[in-house]
């Protein structure tokens, strides 16, 4: 029999197990590989205005005269204007009430974004709005609406920040998690698979650069690879649970192993690895696989234990 702690651990796949943040809008960011790897783009900004002070595109010369930077384009001016307008609309972003957040994005940001003249600016702010609204709806259990908004965010993310960006992969993981909540197993598998593929592509890009750099740059790239592996761990966890719920226990066991390997490579927290170990042990028990049971038991023995709980396990 499994303890209460172990039974609870079987739900590990419904949250971003291997990552430090579960909200898509505040997903972990990573560094960008050097310019020699164009497919690994920089992570997107958090979905709120950065500052109340509009970015300046002006410099002053030696005589005190204002000089407009040549890099200032109509597109960048529009981007600055929208960001500046939203900064004043939202003020200091401390609001935690999901309905208030949803209303703000729906009434203030989306109409402005829809009237943007430049496709990338329009896509950028529509993506930010739909991602944030979808994340809030997911926390409220409004999964059908959350799925719709995340699909819309993905459509916009193809334009900005692009399919190779970490944000695009984050959205697929968020969508997969919502689809698991809806018990749409096939859809969840398809979404998680997209995330796995994109993350692997980013890892491949980092690995192409790694032999060419040294020192702090190399260390930063290794950390970035670990960040990608943590998200792959989460995606494989979602895939494992979907297979489990479909009754494909053999496939679920293989995917759980992949989630564990990614978690180890990413140096995931011991608590996260323990949850995977519990689930792997549960699958071994269901399939009467003594070899698998022994493997997971051995891993559990070597994984550091969390501090003892103040309440007894039931």
Image (cartoon, rainbow, N blue to C red):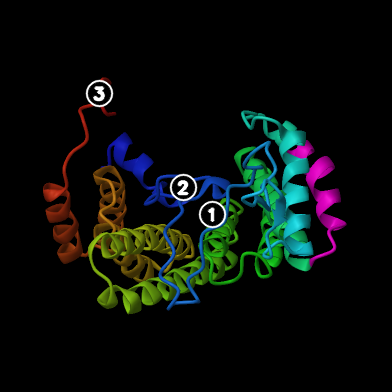
* Marks 1 and 2, the one that precedes in the sequence: 2
Above-or-below relation of 244 to 61 = below
Residue at 27 percent of width and 65 percent of height: 218
Q: Residue at x 26, y 28 (%)?
A: 313
Characterize the local packing of mark 2: few (<14), some (14-19) or many (20 or more) Cα atoms within 10 angstroms. Answer: some
Residue 104 inside the magenta-drawn segment: yes
Q: Main secondary structure of the magenta part?
A: helix
Question: In which quadrant will I find the N terminus?
Answer: top left
* Residue at the spot of label 3: 312
Crowd band around label 1 with a 10 angstrom C-alpha radius: few (<14), some (14–19), many (20+)? many
Mark 1 in CB contact with mark 2 (< 8 angstroms): yes
On screen, residue 242 versus residue 82, left or right, reads: left
Could one spot residue 39 in this view of the protein?
yes
Residue at the limit of the structure toward the top, as seen here:
310
Q: Which residue is mark 2?
A: 15
Confirm whether residue 144 shows in the render. Answer: no
Q: Is residue 88 above or below residue 19?
A: above
Helix, strand or loop at mark 2: loop
Residue 106: x, y in percent? 80, 44
181 sits to left or right of 97: left
Compare residues 272 and 44 and report the one nearer the observer: 44
Residue 177 is marked as 1
- How far apart marks 1 and 2 lie (CA) works out to 7 Å
Going by the image, does 302 lie left or right of 266? left
Disc 3 vs disc 1: which is toward the camera? Answer: 1
Magenta stretch: includes residue 92: no
In the image, residue 36 lies at what x, y percent?
43, 78
- Magenta extent: 102-118
- Give me the residue at 54% from left, 54% from top: 177
């Amino acid at each position: 029999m499994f303890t209460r702690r172990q039974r609870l651990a079987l739900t590990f796949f419904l949250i971003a197990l291997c990552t430090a943040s579960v909200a898509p809008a505040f997903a972990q960011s990573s560094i960008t590989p050097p310019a020699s790897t164009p497919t690994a783009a920089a992570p997107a900004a958090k979905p709120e205005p950065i500052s109340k002070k509009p970015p300046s595109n002006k410099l002053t010369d030696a005589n005190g005269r204002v000089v407009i930077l040549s890099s200032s384009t109509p597109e960048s001016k529009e981007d600055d204007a929208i960001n500046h307008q939203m900064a004043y609309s939202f003020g200091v972003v401390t609001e935690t009430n999901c309905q208030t957040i949803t209303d703000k994005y729906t009434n203030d940001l989306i109409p402005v974004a829809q009237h943007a003249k430049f496709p990338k600016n329009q896509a950028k702010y529509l993506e930010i709005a739909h991602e944030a609204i979808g994340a809030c709806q997911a926390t409220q259990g409004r999964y059908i609406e959350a799925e719709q908004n995340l699909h819309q965010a993905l459509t916009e993310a193809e334009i900005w920040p692009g399919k190779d960006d970490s944000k695009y992969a984050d959205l697929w993981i968020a969508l997969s998690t919502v689809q698991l909540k809806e018990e749409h197993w096939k859809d969840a598998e398809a979404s998680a698979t997209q995330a796995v593929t994109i993350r692997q592509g980013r890892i491949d890009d980092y690995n192409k650069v790694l032999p060419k750099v040294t020192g702090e740059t190399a260390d930063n790239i290794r950390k970035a690879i670990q960040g990608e592996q943590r998200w792959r761990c989460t995606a494989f966890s979602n895939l494992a649970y979907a297979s489990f719920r479909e009754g494909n226990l053999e496939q679920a066991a293989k995917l759980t192993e992949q989630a564990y390997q990614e978690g180890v490579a990413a140096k995931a927290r011991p608590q996260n690895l323990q949850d995977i170990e519990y689930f792997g042990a549960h699958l071994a028990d269901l399939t009467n696989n003594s070899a698998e049971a022994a493997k997971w038991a051995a891993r559990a023995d070597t994984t550091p234990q969390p501090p003892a709980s103040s309440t007894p396990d039931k």
